[in-house]
Amino acid sequence: MVGSSTRSRLVVIAVVALAVVGTVPVLVAAQSNGQTGGTVVVEEGETVETLEGIGGSVVVRGTVTNDVSAVGGDVRVERTGSVGGDLEAAGGSVTIAGTVEGDVAVGAGSLTIAENGTVGQDLTAGVGSATIEGTIEGDAEIGAETIRLGESASIAGDLRYDGDLEGNTDAVAGDVVEDSSLGVDVAPTVQPFASWLFTAYALAVNLLLGAALLALFPRFSDGVADRVASGPVRSGLVGLLVAVGIPVLLIALAITVIGLPLSLVGGFAFGLLLWIGIIYGRFAVAAWLLSLVGLGNRWLALVVGLVAGAALGQLPIPFVGGVINLLVLLLGLGALVRALYGHWRAGRKRGRERRAGPDEPAAE
């Protein structure tokens, strides 16, 4: 029979799992009215202060008084929509049929400024294709495979571009300058924003899961950290074996018709194992480093480890952060598997002792 403490743990795990898994594909929005969902809509007649989104679509039919920032989905400012500040977007497609009073910075598959669309200041875009039918009241820098200026287009400043320019070049009041560097340089103006926004989102979710692990399984979590500190080489080798061996096994299962469903379930479980492994790895390494200066707080170790891991992913030096995070993953994964195996063996031993009874020795 399941005890009350076990039931409580299961309830907490279920709630955390729903919260974590549920937030991965949906959009996180920061609005004055708190509206969230896979698609966030500011309806006509509605006013919010700011809008920030990840992983879903953003539709503005009403008014956003400040900035709009979106990553990972389509963005549409409808004809009735208005953005009082800047618009920054990285993802699928961006369509402006209403008004953006500030600057627009876009890194996306396509950009469309419709006939009634207006950009109040400058436009910077690195996209697959750009169609300008509306008004840009400042300068425009566009790097794209194709750039089409419609008959109703109007650019008050200069146009610097890289790509195939088509259509009504008379729409540009200033200079039209071809600049081959824009194909490389324009898109990165949006990429740092997208990269840091994704990093902050991942850090928040990792902190949520890490806090749940430490709260629900404090002794087990400390045991994982101890295995990293006391046997880093062994933990790393076990982690490498698991990281290579399980995918090979899953691929072998997927080849067979009977094993395909098991392979799919195993793939999900392996992904979850990797996720917990990197969290435990960062926690364990931070706990070991903090112990060198006399700090033994597990919560501090969790925060320091996860923040440091997130910062490593943003290092300007190529590969360094990725290599360090890979090593930490292998350490955490190996220590986690070793701890799970040790827990399983201890459970089997207790089971044999109970079956053997108080007067009989447990079979070895």
Image (spheres, helix red, strand yellow):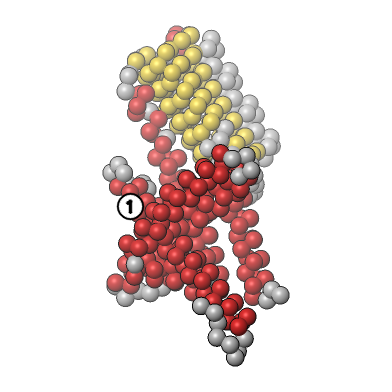
Q: Can residue 64 be seen in the rendering of this structure?
A: no
Instruction: Name the residue beneath numbered marker 1.
Output: 324
Badge 1: how crowded within 10 Å, few (<14), some, or many (20+)? few
Determine the residue positioned at 48% across, 46% down.
247
Report x, y in % for residue 103.
46, 32
**What's under tag 1, amino acid-wise?**
Ile
Q: Position of residue 41 (x, y in %)?
A: 65, 38
Choose between 71 and 10: the one closer to the eye.
10
Nearer to us in this view, 188 or 9: 9
Q: Secondary structure at mark 1?
A: helix
Task: Please determine whether, in this image, residue 239 is positioned above or below residue 313.
Answer: below
Q: Residue furthest right?
A: 1
Identify which residue is drawn at 39% across, 40% down.
192
Q: Is residue 88 visible?
A: yes
Viewer-proximal residue among 87 and 266:
266
List x then y, in percent, for residue 308.
Answer: 37, 57
User: Please, which residue is most extreme toward the bottom here?
Assistant: 359
Residue 185 vertical placement versus 157 (above, below) = below
Residue 35 drawn above or below residue 273: above
Residue that appears at 68% across and 35% down: 44
In the image, 64: left or right of 142?
right
Q: Residue at x 51, y 55 (%)?
A: 273
Q: Is residue 202 left or right of residue 289?
A: right
Q: Is residue 146 left or right of residue 50?
A: left
Q: Position of residue 1 (x, y in %)?
A: 71, 75
User: Dividing the picture into quarters, in which one does residue 216 lie?
Assistant: bottom right
Quadrant of residue 361 in the image? bottom right
